[in-house]
């Protein structure tokens, strides 16, 4: 399913997005909401990357950043980067990691050099340095489907106009050609042309979502961000939408980034999965790998928290204490340590790096020291039989 | 009311003898032994019909819904959006926004009392045959009377928690205000009695306080000082007194010597002035009248006739007392005279919040809804709903708005509470998995009708109705992810022009000719397993 | 704590508004031809004001030199006195500083003798207004009370008993309030009451001829409070201020005339009603609609499900939330409310700021007074808005606690 | 995946039936028209709104009628002070009498009224000597200084088109400016928003009537505003300057909401530029509140005109101008010889004279009917457009 040969279609490095908090007497900036804090991802051609996390963990922001719907605080995204560029970037960021100090401040001379070169590369290729005209062309290739099908369709436009708008914006073909294209789009998503002459409010949630998908497909994109496309829908309808998406991916070799808090849906949809917590990626692996042998305690807790539609199997579950901390004041060290069942002293002061502990399996957790490398099977998973049914989390380790 | 302290097990057969558990009801002691036939039915909904009268026509939101809830059981009500789950809940408690909605017919027997009594007198409905729109002529006096009657049941008999905790709490009042409102409303007399009976000045209080301080100084851990605090409470004959002293000690620095004195100062409030005493007695009188009124309303609903004379008498008395109440307002000292009651309610609230495992109950109680997270608020909502142990708790999508991990917490909590106080729960959700976690029995709803009812295991292992089967099949399953998702074709029909016959037939893979004409009867298949589908030919279920 | 920050921020935000208002008025003033400004500053022929003086500073053809400038010494003197020969920004600076120091109207910034004259016997504008303000304030307070005690309960009832008689009644009230301009309503009421009940209800009695309770009991009218000519109180002219506070009721009481203060209050009922009516009309609908919205919100349903009796649900849970909206709207409509004063005070001969504004409008305009009273009214509006904001913050924890 | 496709496309073909409610089966009308129908349905159920519409239609009819044929409202001949002598009709000294054209003069000092006047004689005031006298019912005296009489009926007729025209012009222009400013400020936000909103605050904190007055009072002195047409323009300009901030504030609030909607972001995602976003997405979704506000103001502005005139402020090119508000105001203001209205009332109280009630009753009535009908309609519109308030 996963093969490394498939080149990365879109890849972003150290994405950061801080939203300022204003307050005080003169509404001055008194802090930052670190919605996204150093996210590195890549989505490969005609594959799906699942992005999982609780609400407020910044997954939606990542999606919007990758489409440059908002400008990042720092970091870059590269669309269709050539292999050599990719390799170069990898090495550069590696050197940066060795070089003391994070990106931006000081560091060793080679880190400095790396920084400079990164900047040059960014100037040429980064999405965020493109001129608006270039960006506008690209927009056709990068599309998005929103969570809420009710606010994502303009209530005063006919479905025809909604789906056709991208075409009109990009002056794709003559009027009649556009009409033609719209008609076939509608067919593709399983509506019928007679629906074109209606207002969105006349449709059910599922149908609205289909319209949204049709709009996203209008300009034959290569990459679509699916921002919780089914979380507002019923299960039966959800299945319909998911099937459409799968079908389209197969037919048009689309690459998806599937953002969702619903792990089972993500598992059904995606080839790779990245788990986010408080603006950071804590674990990243191939779907099978992640779901059968989750390494990060948070992932394990998430998995065990999913209710299973089967009264017969009663699992003992990891119930996390407390709420997600505010991204305005993320806890020091590992951001999860306030709720972690396997918390260690080190967690509270040093943040664990995201390291590849197994093939194609990255984790940011002190339980898996880099030295163990690929052999690492953390205490949590090692204690649990990684079988179907119970998700290798039977019995969380006692908190020290 | 005080006489009845234990809710008696009763059968709906002779309901007249059975009063509600009043506010006095102590928590139910014996463990509910699961939902078996033995447990009495506390809520019996029969052939409930609720319509909405809109521009497009009459929406048949509920069309003959029937189900039973037994004491201490959890009944899950599951279905897609627009199938009438929430409408059912609101119809049962008569919270349907009117206009446009109205409960048209049916019975809601709560412990044998028909909550919908006098409903059909409230409005005349004429449906215009050609436009399909309806004219509703309401009798506002009757509607008002009906709502007032309901207030005797809401909160103490049936209470609810809602989907969006952030919106379900009043933004301008603090958490403690809102919870203690419920407490005072339903347990007012007892709170007042306790305050009046409290002996904060008693000689044994001081040593208890000293002991508490000592224990805390010695860092005996929270449990130890909790016990000590409980001792304080006993000494003062006011348990909340203990709670308060516990938090006072915990939150104040222990080094200082005159700790105990400062404590006593902090707790001084319970030594009442004469004015405060008078006010409390006055309030108590008012509360008693309210409770008598509630009993009267219950009696009315039970016997199905209105005792106008008694009603007039009680209302007159209530009015007199309200007027007398101005005496305390006139001096502009209301705030002060109310303080004992307020504080008592506050510390009781704190106690309740502890029970739902909130780490820092005092801060939460002082906080306002917009300062708390969704999970926290949902806990608060639950506390509020269970302030007086109600017979039934209706939970309308309690975890839908929450994250997975928080949802897990809340479900744990609900399970725990259910086993502690034998409240029956009517759990409404669209998430079959959640239902599977907590429900004992499950009703599957589709397009305003209940298509299948079965014990949870039974339902999930062999669902009978095609809709149920489709629903279960379409859940993306963590265990078998590669299995292609099967989906139910189409979408929920609009309920203005529902399909003839079986409402599911346009989407049903097994649709037969008969399905298009005849509405399938509800038949019994196996123990407690009923289904409404032409595929099954079991004996027709009795209402 | 956060509340204080909030309030202080509001106060800071007021500064640009006030400066802005000043600037607008300044712009308008400097758009005037210099001739008019001179006349309205010094040269107004007295209306019925004793002791106005009128130098003829017109720049006749004699005084125009070949370069087109006016060489009339008087003219130049006055132009210089007013600093009209300074560059605009200097004038602006003077204007702002004067206005902030309550020297409205024209101040000569060059010759030391400051005479920020109004046409009323050379009294400075601020002085005249300070005499008249109390009466206006008293009227405002009366009508605000009326507004609040009418619109809030009525609006809530209209929402609760929607589309039923009381709602229709409130609808009629608000619509008629929208549709009846103050001067018509005032006139009709005046006619009705005066012709039916006698002049006591006809506002203040400028001629001292009319009947009044006071005269009914005491025969004659105390001369201090009598206005010999119907335009403005005599004491403005004779420096003798017989009115220590300026609030008529209080003054009358201080004069030891209990009946007179009662008389004054009765005379204030009609004007207050007329002023209140328009605002009530606007407010009622807002109260009703906001109440309707609040009643559909989830927490109201929660309160009901708790078993809270309906009356408490409405008064406490819904009412408290809709109150915020009400107050905000009141703040927004306050400017209109103030705008009603000139009319009403004119109809009922009440010697308030509004009446003085109208008086100053009779040609030749007394721009000093016109702009002065405008600025004063604007101050009132701004002040009211600050109060509203503070109240709002107090009522709504979401604002109070940020 | 193929069967997936089949499986997916199949249901829709089936569900079409339910997806389309039976009410809309068969040949569907244009959806926009359907929407209008919906609104119209709610309007029709609202009795007051219907009343409002009817009255408005009548007024518009009158206006058109008044425009089509020129109605004579030329001034009558002047009264001269020397004409004050006794006459039979009322034994009050200094009165004059008038008689219809063609008939015989009842007395030597009676004046011929032009044809088209009612013959019946009703008392009014000869302002030329401030004493009481008589004049035909349906004539209106204008000012103490200028004793000319105008036909009140003609004035009422002509008033309709002036009131409607002026108010519509003012509201239209104001709304346009407000829409632009509000949209810009709301969409771009940041310091633009800050600046514009501060300005709006400044404008809104000056009491509107006073603001209009001072603006016009100053501008009137400028030479460009001397000719007749420019005077009317001046009036409109004065009001617009004061009025646009209301709309700006409303629009901006609405835009702030709409801007956050997902469909705007979607348009952005498919490359729409700022202009397109504003014009195609934001403005269409934020204009409705403006419509309501506009319709309310169309009713309010004639009242304010009247108020201005009442305050003795020469808004109009000639002192008398056939606009209801000003007609009513003028008559109230100066219909009586006495220095104040109260005085007149007091003096007339004991039958010494007759208050010329008709002089402000009829214009006032027209004004009231017009304003209230507009308000009925506006309120109905709001309820019909705002689903929350629907019955």
Image (cartoon, rainbow, N blue to C red):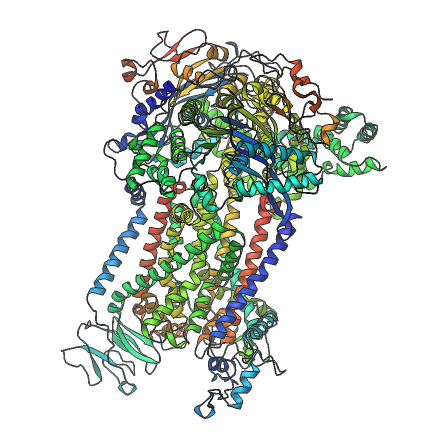
Work out whether residue C377 or residue A237 is closer to the camera in this orientation and state it. A237
User: Outermost residue toward the bottom?
Assistant: C62
Is B358 placed above or below C90 here? above
Q: Is residue C57 visible?
A: yes
The image position of residue C261, as x and y in percent, is 55, 67
Q: Residue at x 59, y 35 (%)?
A: A13
* Residue B472 image-quadrant placement: top left
**Residue nearer the viewer, B456 or D332:** B456
> In the displayed structure, does residue D149 sit left or right of residue B441?
left
Q: Is residue D381 above or below residue A229?
A: below
Kindly indicate the quadrant of the structure image that contains residue D160.
bottom left
**From the viewer's perspective, is residue C128 above or below residue B510?**
below
Q: Residue at x 44, y 36 (%)?
A: A141
In the rendered view of the protein, which quadrant contains the C terminus of chain B? top left
Residue A191 picture quarter: top left
Residue at the outermost right position = B257
> x, y percentage for residue C177?
40, 57
Q: Residue furthest front?
A: A84
């Amino acid at each position: 399913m996963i093969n490394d040969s498939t080149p990365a279609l879109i890849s972003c490095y150290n994405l950061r997005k801080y939203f300022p908090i204003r307050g005080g007497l003169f509404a001055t900036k008194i802090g930052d909401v670190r919605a996204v804090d150093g996210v590195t991802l890549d989505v490969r051609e005609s594959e799906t990357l699942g992005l999982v996390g609780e609400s407020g963990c910044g997954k939606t922001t990542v999606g919007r950043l990758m489409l440059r719907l908002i400008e990042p605080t720092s970091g870059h995204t590269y669309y269709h980067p050539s292999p050599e560029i990719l390799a170069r970037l990898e090495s550069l960021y590696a050197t940066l990691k060795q070089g003391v100090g994070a990106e931006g401040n000081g560091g060793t001379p080679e880190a400095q050099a790396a920084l400079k070169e990164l900047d040059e590369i960014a100037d040429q290729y980064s999405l965020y340095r493109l001129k608006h005209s270039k960006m506008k062309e690209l927009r056709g290739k990068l599309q998005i489907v929103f969570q809420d099908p009710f606010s994502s369709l303009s209530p005063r436009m006919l479905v025809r106009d909604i789906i056709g708008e991208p075409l009109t914006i990009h002056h794709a073909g003559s009027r009649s050609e556009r009409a033609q294209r719209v008609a076939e789009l509608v067919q593709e998503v399983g509506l019928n042309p007679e629906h074109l002459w209606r207002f969105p409010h006349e449709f059910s949630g599922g149908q609205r979502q289909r319209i949204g998908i049709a709009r996203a497909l209008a300009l034959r994109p290569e990459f679509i961000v699916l921002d919780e496309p089914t979380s507002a829908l019923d299960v039966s309808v959800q299945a319909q939408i998911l099937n459409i998406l799968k079908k389209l991916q197969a037919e048009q070799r689309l690459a998806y980034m599937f953002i969702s808090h619903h792990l089972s849906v993500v598992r059904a949809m995606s080839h790779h999965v990245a788990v986010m917590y408080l603006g950071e990626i804590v674990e990243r692996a191939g779907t099978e790998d992640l779901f059968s042998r989750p390494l990060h305690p948070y992932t394990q807790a998430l998995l065990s928290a999913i209710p299973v539609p089967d009264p017969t199997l009663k699992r003992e579950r990891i119930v996390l204490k407390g709420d997600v901390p505010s991204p305005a004041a993320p806890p020091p060290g590992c951001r999860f340590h306030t709720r972690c069942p396997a918390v260690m002293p080190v967690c509270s002061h040093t943040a664990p790096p995201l390291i590849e502990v197994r093939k194609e399996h990255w984790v940011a957790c002190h339980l898996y020291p880099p030295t163990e490398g690929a052999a690492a099977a953390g205490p949590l998973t090692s204690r649990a039989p990684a079988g179907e049914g119970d998700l290798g989390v039977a019995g969380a380790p006692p908190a020290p | 009311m005080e006489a009845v302290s234990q809710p008696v097990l009763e059968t709906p057969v002779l309901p007249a003898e059975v009063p509600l558990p009043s506010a006095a009801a102590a928590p139910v002691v014996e463990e509910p032994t699961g939902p078996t036939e033995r447990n009495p039915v506390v809520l019996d909904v029969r052939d409930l019909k609720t319509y909405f009268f809109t521009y497009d026509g009459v929406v048949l939101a509920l069309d003959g819904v029937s189900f039973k809830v037994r004491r201490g059981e959890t009944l899950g009500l599951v279905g897609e959006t627009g199938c009438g789950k929430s409408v059912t809940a609101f119809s049962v408690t008569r919270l349907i926004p009117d206009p446009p909605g109205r409960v048209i017919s049916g019975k809601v027997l709560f412990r044998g009392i028909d909550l919908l009594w006098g409903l059909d007198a409230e409005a005349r409905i004429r449906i215009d045959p050609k436009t399909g729109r309806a004219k509703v002529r309401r009798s506002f006096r009757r509607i008002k009377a009906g709502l007032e009657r309901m207030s005797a049941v809401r909160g103490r008999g049936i209470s609810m928690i809602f989907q969006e905790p952030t919106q379900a709490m009043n933004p301008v009042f603090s958490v403690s205000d809102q919870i203690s409102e419920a407490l005072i409303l339903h347990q007012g007399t007892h709170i007042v009695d306790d305050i009046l009976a409290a002996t904060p000045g008693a000689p044994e209080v001081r040593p208890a306080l000293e002991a508490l301080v000592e224990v805390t100084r010695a860092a005996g851990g929270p449990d130890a000082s909790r016990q000590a605090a409980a001792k304080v409470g006993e000494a003062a004959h006011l348990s909340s007194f203990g709670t308060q002293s516990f938090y006072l000690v915990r939150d104040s620095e222990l080094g200082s010597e005159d700790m105990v004195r400062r404590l006593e100062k902090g707790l001084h409030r319970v030594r009442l002035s004469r004015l405060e005493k008078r006010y409390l007695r006055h309030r108590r009188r008012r509360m008693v009248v309210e409770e008598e009124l509630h009993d009267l309303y219950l009696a009315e609903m039970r016997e199905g006739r209105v005792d106008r004379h008694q009603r007039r008498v009680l209302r007159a008395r209530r009015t007199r007392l309200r007027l007398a109440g101005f005496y305390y307002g006139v001096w502009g000292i209301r705030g002060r005279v109310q303080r004992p009651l307020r504080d008592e309610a506050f510390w009781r609230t704190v106690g309740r919040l502890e029970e739902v495992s909130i780490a820092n109950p005092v801060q939460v109680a002082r906080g306002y809804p917009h300062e708390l997270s969704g999970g926290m608020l949902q806990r608060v909502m639950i506390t509020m709903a269970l302030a007086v142990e109600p017979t039934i708790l209706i939970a309308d999508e309690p975890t839908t708005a929450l994250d997975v991990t928080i949802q897990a917490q809340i479900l744990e909590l609900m399970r725990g509470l259910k086993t502690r106080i034998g409240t029956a729960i009517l759990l409404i959700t669209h998430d079959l998995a959640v239902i599977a976690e907590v429900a004992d029995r499950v009703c599957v709803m589709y397009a305003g009708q209940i298509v299948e009812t079965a014990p949870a295991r039974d339902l999930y292992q062999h669902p009978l109705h095609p809709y149920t089967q489709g629903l279960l099949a379409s859940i993306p399953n963590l265990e078998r992810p590669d299995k292609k998702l099967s989906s139910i074709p189409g979408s929920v029909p609009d309920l203005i022009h529902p399909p003839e016959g079986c409402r599911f037939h346009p989407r049903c893979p097994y649709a037969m000719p008969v399905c298009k004409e005849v509405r399938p009867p509800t038949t019994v298949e196996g123990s407690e397993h009923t289904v409404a589908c032409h595929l099954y030919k079991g004996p027709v279920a009795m209402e | 704590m956060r509340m204080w920050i909030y309030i202080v921020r509001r106060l800071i935000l007021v500064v640009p508004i006030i400066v802005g208002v000043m600037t607008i008025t300044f712009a308008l003033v400097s758009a005037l031809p210099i001739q008019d400004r001179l006349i309205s500053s010094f040269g107004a022929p007295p209306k019925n004001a004793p002791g106005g003086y009128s130098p003829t500073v017109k720049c006749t053809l004699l005084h125009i030199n070949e370069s087109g400038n006016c060489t009339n010494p008087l003219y130049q003197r006055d132009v210089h006195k007013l600093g009209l020969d300074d560059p605009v920004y200097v004038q602006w600076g003077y204007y702002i500083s004067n206005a902030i120091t309550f020297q409205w109207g024209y101040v000569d910034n060059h010759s030391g003798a400051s005479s920020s004259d109004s046409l009323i016997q050379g009294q400075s504008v601020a002085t005249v207004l300070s005499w008249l303000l109390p009466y206006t304030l008293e009227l405002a307070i009366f009508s605000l009370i009326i507004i609040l005690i009418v619109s809030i309960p009525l609006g809530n009832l209209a929402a609760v008993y929607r589309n039923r008689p009381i709602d229709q009644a409130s609808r009629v009230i608000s619509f008629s309030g929208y549709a009846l301009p103050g001067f018509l309503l005032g006139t009709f009421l005046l006619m009705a009451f005066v012709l039916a009940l006698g002049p006591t209800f006809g506002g203040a009695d400028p001629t001292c001829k009319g009947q009044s309770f006071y005269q009914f009991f005491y025969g004659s009218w105390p001369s201090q409070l009598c206005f010999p000519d119907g335009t403005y109180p005599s004491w403005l002219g004779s420096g003798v201020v017989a009115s220590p506070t300026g609030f008529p009721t209080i003054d009358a009481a201080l004069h030891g005339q209990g009946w007179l203060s009662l008389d004054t209050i009765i005379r204030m009922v009609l004007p207050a009603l007329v002023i209140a009516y328009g605002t009530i009309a606007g407010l009622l609908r807002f109260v009703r609609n906001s109440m309707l919205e609040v009643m559909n919100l989830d927490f109201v349903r929660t309160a009901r499900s708790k078993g809270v009796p309906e009356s408490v649900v409405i008064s406490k849970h819904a009412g408290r939330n809709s109150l915020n909206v009400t107050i905000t709207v009141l703040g927004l409509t306050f400017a209109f409310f103030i705008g009603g004063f000139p009319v009403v005070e004119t109809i009922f001969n009440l010697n308030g700021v509004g009446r003085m504004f109208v008086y100053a409008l009779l040609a030749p305009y007394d721009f000093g007074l016109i702009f002065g009273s405008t600025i004063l009214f604007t101050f009132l509006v701004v002040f009211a808005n600050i109060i509203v904001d503070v109240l709002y913050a107090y009522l709504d924890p979401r604002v109070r606690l940020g | 995946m193929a069967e997936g496709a089949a499986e997916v496309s199949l249901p829709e073909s089936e569900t079409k039936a339910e997806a389309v409610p039976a009410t809309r089966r068969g040949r569907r009308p244009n959806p926009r028209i359907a929407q209008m129908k919906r609104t119209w349905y709610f309007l029709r159920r609202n009795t007051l709104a219907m009343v409002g519409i009817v009255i408005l239609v009548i007024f518009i009819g009158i206006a058109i009628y008044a425009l089509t044929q020129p109605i004579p409202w030329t001034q009558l001949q002047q009264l001269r002070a020397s004409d004050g002598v006794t006459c039979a009709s009322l034994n009050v000294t200094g009165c004059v009498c008038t008689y219809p054209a063609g008939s015989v003069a009842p007395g030597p000092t009676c004046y011929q009224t032009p044809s088209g006047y009612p013959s019946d004689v009703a008392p009014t005031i000869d302002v030329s000597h401030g004493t009481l006298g008589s004049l035909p019912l349906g004539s209106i005296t204008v000012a103490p200084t200028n004793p000319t009489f105008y036909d009140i009926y003609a004035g009422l007729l002509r008033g309709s088109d002036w009131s409607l025209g002026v108010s519509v012009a003012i509201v239209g222009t104001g709304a346009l400016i407000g829409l632009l400013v509000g949209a810009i400020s709301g969409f771009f936000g940041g310091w633009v928003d800050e600046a514009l909103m501060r300005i709006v605050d400044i404008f809104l904190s000056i009491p509107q009537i006073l603001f209009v007055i001072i603006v016009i009072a100053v501008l009137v002195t400028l030479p460009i505003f001397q000719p007749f047409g420019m005077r009317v323009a001046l009036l409109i300009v004065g009001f617009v300057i004061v009025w646009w901030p209301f709309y700006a504030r409303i629009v901006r609030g609405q835009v702030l909401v709409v801007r956050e909607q997902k469909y705007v972001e979607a348009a952005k995602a498919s490359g729409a530029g700022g202009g397109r976003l504003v014009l195609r997405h934001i403005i269409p979704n934020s204009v409705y509140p403006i419509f309501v506000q506009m319709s309310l103001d169309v009713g309010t502005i004639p009242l304010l005109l009247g108020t201005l005139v009442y305050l003795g402020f020469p808004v109009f090119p000639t002192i008398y101008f056939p606009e209801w508000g000003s007609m009513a105001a003028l008559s109230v203001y100066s219909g009586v010889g006495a220095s104040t209205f109260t005085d007149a009332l007091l003096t007339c109280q004991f039958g010494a004279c007759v208050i010329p009630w008709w002089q402000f009753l009829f214009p006032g009535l027209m004004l009231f009917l017009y304003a209230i009908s507009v308000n009925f309609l506006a309120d109905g519109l709001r309820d019909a457009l705002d689903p929350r308030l629907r019955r």
